[in-house]
Image: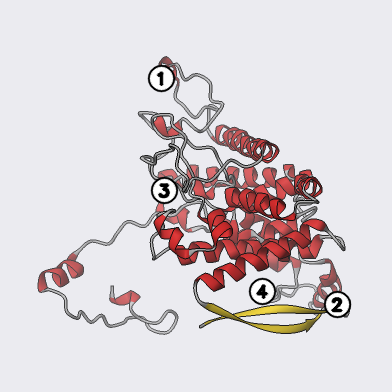
Amino acid sequence: MSGRAGRRGYDSAGTVIFMALPTSKTRRLLTASLATLRGNAPYTTSFLLRLFDYVNGWKDQEKSITEAKEKFKKGKLVDTTDTLNTEVRIKAALTLLDNCFALYTKDEAKRAAFNRLLKYLTLFNVQLLRREQLLNAKCELTGFAQVATALSSFEPGNLVFVHILQKGEFHKLCKKYAEEPKKLQDTLILILAHIFTNKRLPISYDTGDDSNKPALKPMPDEFQTLVDEYNSNVDKLLLAFLQLATEKRHLQSPVFELTGKIKEDSLDTAHLDVVSPFDEDLILDEKLMPAAARTLYDHRGNKIQMNSYAYDFWKNGSKDDLIKINKLSQLEYWYLIDNFSHVLIGIYSALFDVSKQRDKLLDVMREIADEYEDKFKKAFSMRSNIEETVTVEGKREKTKKWHRS
């Protein structure tokens, strides 16, 4: 305990002072055994995409890289602090992947198997990015990869958003409701709430007729089809690579074929097995899986409803309803609305870098992001200072700089 009390990198030991604690609790803290630390997969799909972006660098850096390489003569070591050098970036990336914390928390007997599994999980993520046309044959970023990296803080929704964006469904929606701007905004907020929020309602929630329903309404069918298509591709690809990582290409032992589950075509039933096919040391956190907006069911087969707090706040702008109707606690409702507001701002910023001039989707996203943030700041008594900036085209625009009152 005292070893963690010092300043990292400065003190080899620190001092712990117990204040206003009973002697029995102090004694228990001093004599209790340390908790077992267990690592997990050290990366996500978006993290690997950003890692490839780091390794490949940018096209405008080619000249700087060439000049940096000329500084070193043959026979001399490469400067490990020179991140402009491709070899240094590759070495840094491999060091990160080969020395993850999870490997050092396993027994020697399990370490080799877990290391092999991590390699196949890496291949799964790379293959998924290739299928989504975010990486080319040389593993260089392509297509809407920059949009995915810009929204990497909101994964896995960023990959689902890019998948729908590539299909052109957002632009079709803009054309469909060209004469109904308010309905277009409401529909976009509903779709984005499905993709980027994951607050579940209790299983005991009553879905009866109620004018104040906190359940998120279904998104349009064409968008739900694309989301289901993406999630299905992720499941099938992940299952294939997990089977490839096993010796006999099967997750289940032949002993359990007597139960009737012979086909291994889905991972959805893995948590229902009496004996899990996965090692107890492997924590399968669903947040590590690049899938979002799934249709989930409880143990009775009933559909699990999602909380519509993000969409409801867009409609009424009331923070009191977030507590009364959406049943959010006072400790979380500010952060949830703030996070979704940042999602909208992030989408606009990402689209701004790749969109053409007078893109309808870009214009609508800017209007939505501004209006949602206005409602957020107003509901939580936060004021804004309007600043005037000059854009690249020479046009003057009003930008907002928010401050808490």
The secondary element bearing badge 4 is classed as: loop
How far apart marks 3 and 1 lie (CA) works out to 27 Å
For residue 246, side relative to residue 365 (left or right):
left
The secondary element bearing badge 1 is classed as: helix
Q: Earlier in the sequence, mark 3 or mark 4?
A: 4
Name the residue beneath numbered marker 4: 80
The secondary element bearing badge 2 is classed as: loop
Label 1–label 4 contact, CB within 8 A: no
Q: Earlier in the sequence, mark 2 or mark 3?
A: 3
Q: Residue at x 50, y 55 (%)?
A: 309
Disc 1 residue type (three-letter): Val
Task: Between label 1 and label 4, give the one nearer the viewer.
Answer: 1
Name the residue beneath numbered marker 3: 108
Name the residue beneath numbered marker 2: 392
Whether residue 215 is visible, yes or no, is yes
How far apart marks 2 and 1 lie (CA) works out to 67 Å
Q: Residue at x 59, y 38 (%)?
A: 238
